[in-house]
Amino acid sequence: MNDMMQPAQVPGAPSLPQVNLLPPHVRAKRKLAVVRVWLVLAILLVVLMTSLAAVATVWEKQSAESELVDVQTVNDGLLQQQTTYAEVPKLLRELTARKEARAVAMSTEMLWSPYLAAISSATPLGASIDTLSVTQATVWSGTQGETSGPLSTPGTVGQVSLNGRALTVGAVSEWEDGLTSLKGVVDVEVSTVERSDDNGNVYYAVGATFTLTPDAFANQFVMEQ
């Protein structure tokens, strides 16, 4: 019967009523100790974060200084190269000026050795050249704009006169055709064809002229545009 009258127990609850008999100042002191612990932990956390921030700042500063040193090194190298190659633009300008001067001075150049060989090859077997004279335009004299007749080619740059011999009149005609076929040769004119005798050897004394066009120039130093 007494067992049935026993009050029910709540799990986890004290079996008997608990009473805090500590004085209020003791309880206050314990709470203050807990607060101090949390305050110390907060201070330590602040110190740790401050230290980490300081370390990060120092690292960033060192990294920036290292990058600055690298940039200064590269800049010094570029300045040294600039000093080394400072004369290059001036030399390039001088080289261009010399090329232009050479192109002007050599603009009327004619390679007479191969050109005379071409004139010789245009001479038929039954003919030969005795004398050859050339009047050519130069940079200083200018081109020969005057023409000898209304049918002459304008803008010629030289004139060639030759005297020679031909065994037949047909050879004279072949000679004229051969000269006309040469590059830069126009207005071929046979001025005289006279029958002559040299110790019983009959031949025809031939006098001819032809003019030269700019196509006869060598153009070895023409500046590229």
Image (spheres, grey):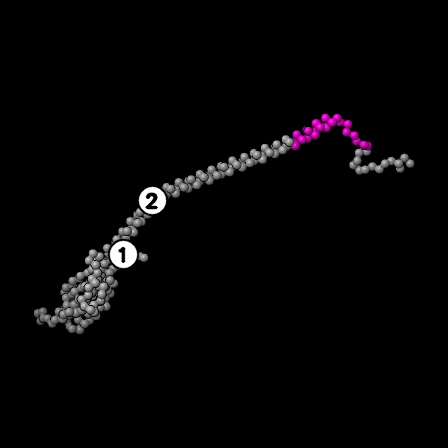
Residue at 12% x, 71% y: name it.
194
Q: Is residue 10 above or below residue 168?
A: above
Q: Is residue 32 magenta-colored?
A: yes
Q: Earlier in the sequence, mark 1 or mark 2?
A: 2
Q: Residue, x 19% and y 64% (percent of image)? A: 146
- Residue 137 shows in this picture: yes
x%, y% of residue 213? 23, 64
35 sits to left or right of 15? left
Residue indicated by mark 2: 86
Residue underneath mark 1 = 221
Q: Is residue 72 covered in magenta?
A: no
Q: Give the left or right position of residue 182, taking residue 200 as reference.
A: right
Does residue 26 sit above or below 6 in this rendering?
above
- The kind of residue tagged 1 is Phe
Secondary element at tag 1: loop
Q: Residue at x 43, y 41 (%)?
A: 71
* Percent coordinates x, y for residue 195 in the rendering: 11, 72
Image coords of residue 122 (percent x, y) = 21, 67
Residue at point 79% right, 31% down? 18
Name the main secondary structure of what is drawn in magenta.
helix
Mark 1 to mark 2 CA distance (whole Å) = 28 Å
Look at the image and give the residue range highlighted in magenta.
16-38
